[in-house]
Amino acid sequence: MKTVYMIRHGQTPGNAEKRYSGGRTDESLCEEGIKVAREAKKTYDEIFAPYKGNFRICVSPLKRAVETAGILFGEDRDDFTKIDNLKEMDFGLFEGKTYDELNGTPEFQAWVDSGGKDQVPGAETFEGFAERIYDGFKEAVGPSIEDETVAVVCHGGTIMAAMSVLTGRDKYDFMVNNLCGYRIELENKDGKIHLLSYTGIDFGDDPRPDYRRSP
């Protein structure tokens, strides 16, 4: 049995400005993001208290994920495992831009008309992104068949992709706000991951933003 907590990082300047902050954007948490992450620590202290420190921590190598993990789980811990494949999606032409900056452009309108399914120019395809994220998720879970708990601090798109692959449902069913995520129960058996159950972890007033407009 494996218990995996997938947690989205705290707010960054790009998040606050509703920019498409993807894998090319490596920014720290903003002041508000640090403040709220410290408040969220109380919630996560309660969630992880039963494990008495006996859990692994895996993170995306981008600053916003590493900094969030440090706030939530202790900056004195030096055992975070950085996994490149957990990075946010490369948004290509949309990277670093806001909805208002993109609205009305042919490329953005075509993407909206496709329901967010078409590839953005210069970006990863969702299929390729999901495959990469699933590889990163499997690396975080590890090969061991022993009971284990893992905290994974990453990105909204990372969580959406992983949950979509695990459940077979639409990625937009799994949008989460900063510092929210999912508790996942699974088995790692015969080299394959078998999803048993999952529940949402909410922090704040609105855990489901319009991800199509502000990832």
Image (cartoon, rainbow, N blue to C red):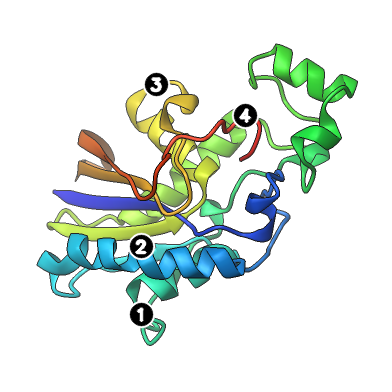
Q: Which residue is label 3 attached to?
A: 169
Q: Which residue is label 4 attached to?
A: 212
Q: Earlier in the sequence, mark 3 or mark 2?
A: 2
Which callout, 3 or 2, points to the residue nearer the camera? 2
Q: Is residue 163 above or below residue 142?
A: above
Which callout, 1 or 2, points to the residue nearer the camera? 2
Q: Which residue is label 1 attached to?
A: 74
How crowded is the residue under tag 1: few (<14 C-alpha within 10 Å), some, or many (20+)?
A: few
Three-letter code for the amino acid on which mark 1 is drawn = Gly
Going by the image, does 10 lie left or right of 39?
right
Real-space Cα distance between discs 3 and 2?
Answer: 28 Å
Q: Which of marks 4 and 2 is nearer the N terminus?
A: 2
Going by the image, does 55 lie left or right of 41?
left
> Considering depth in this image, is 59 or 95 the residue closer to the camera?
95
Which callout, 4 or 2, points to the residue nearer the camera? 2
Q: Earlier in the sequence, mark 4 or mark 1?
A: 1
| Residue located at (46% from left, 46% from top) | 135
Going by the image, does 155 lie left or right of 40?
right
Residue 77, percent across and down? Answer: 36, 83
Instruction: Kindly indicate the quadrant of the structure image that contains residue 73.
Output: bottom left
Q: Which residue is label 2 attached to?
A: 40
Instruction: Kindly indicate the quadrant of the structure image that contains residue 114.
Output: top right
Residue 139, percent across and down? Answer: 39, 55
